[in-house]
Amino acid sequence: MSHKCHSILFGKDGRRVADVASVSADLKDGFVIPEHSHPEDQLLFASRGVMTVRTRRGAWVVPPMRAVWIPAETPHSVEMSGPVSMRTLYFEPRLCGSLPAKCFVMNVSLLLRELILHACVFQKLRKRTPVEKRVIEVILDQLRAVESIPLQLPHPSDARAQRVVNALIADPAEGKALGRLCKDSGASKRTIQRLFLEETGMTFAKWRQQLRLLRAMQLLAAGEKVTAAALEAGYNSTSAFISMFRKQLGTTPRRYLTNGAEAESAA
């Protein structure tokens, strides 16, 4: 059952105490924040470790030096892969009207990273205070310039397609052909292919590929070697995984996941 959190931007007397607020936490591998929602827009940032945000519409994997945007009133849970340094900013919804009304993962520039960490020192930022207002405005300018990156796994809503999704999430390395999976779900192959394309915007093959890529990323963050992560996620070889990773994200898995740690040590 989803839990609705109270606003941290308003006091017990109903008065606004901040326009932006922050929460910092260092969490262990495997820790899960149960499903909940906030009345504020939320920017969830990982300076170390990998987070997986899940909603009823899908999952978003958030590596180091990336962040996920979670619109107000979106029920979501968060799972940690590897030790995670989590920094969260909460925004009064009208502040960020230019951002999409749906979850997405973004790259975080070094400047935005420093602004997030700086905001966490303040804990609460108010536009009526000149210094704090300037920090808020620069953060908003940086957010308007971010670009979405392909680390999401949308979920279909149809019950038959969901049964296929659940089977594959339970075991991404499952080698069953689509025809067999469809038979187990109670739908034809053609129906499942149509549902995936209509409801996720991906072909079934592309969706399965994305699931395996994101699962391998989670395993790497939890400490698995590249070969073990690739095979457990369902790739036939390490080279196949690295090739797909490079095609999707433009670099090797290790380089992608360690650039956050390198940026942190250089700060």
Image: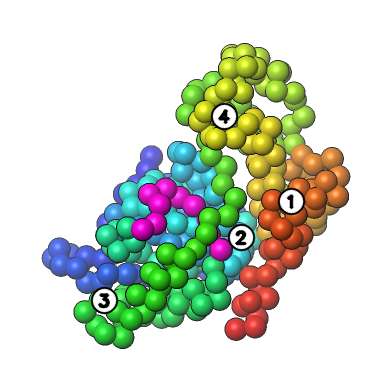
First to last magenta residue range: 98-107
Query: Does the image show residue 88?
Result: no
Reading the image, the residue beneath label 4 is 197
Reading the image, the residue beneath label 3 is 126
Q: Position of residue 17 (x, y in %)?
A: 22, 72
The C terminus: image quadrant: bottom right
Front of the two marks 2 and 1: 1
Q: Quadrant of residue 97?
A: bottom left
- Residue at (30% x, 64% y) in the render: 95
Q: Is residue 226 left or right of residue 164?
A: right
Amino acid type at image mark 2 = Pro
- Residue at (49% x, 24% y) in the render: 158
Front of the two marks 3 and 1: 1
- Kind of element beneath mark 2: loop
Tell me the crowding category of disc 3: few under 14, some 14 to 19, or many 20 or more residues within 10 angstroms, Cα based: many
Q: Are marks 3 and 1 in contact (CB under 8 Å)?
A: no
Query: How many marks on residues?
Result: 4
Reading the image, the residue beneath label 1 is 247
Marked residue nearer the N-terminal end (3 or 1): 3
Q: Are marks 3 and 2 in contact (CB under 8 Å)?
A: no
Q: Position of residue 8 (x, y in %)?
A: 28, 64
Marked residue nearer the N-terminal end (4 or 2): 2
Reading the image, the residue beneath label 2 is 63
- Kind of element beneath mark 1: helix
Q: CA distance from mark 4 to mark 2?
A: 27 Å
Query: Does the image show residue 65?
Result: yes
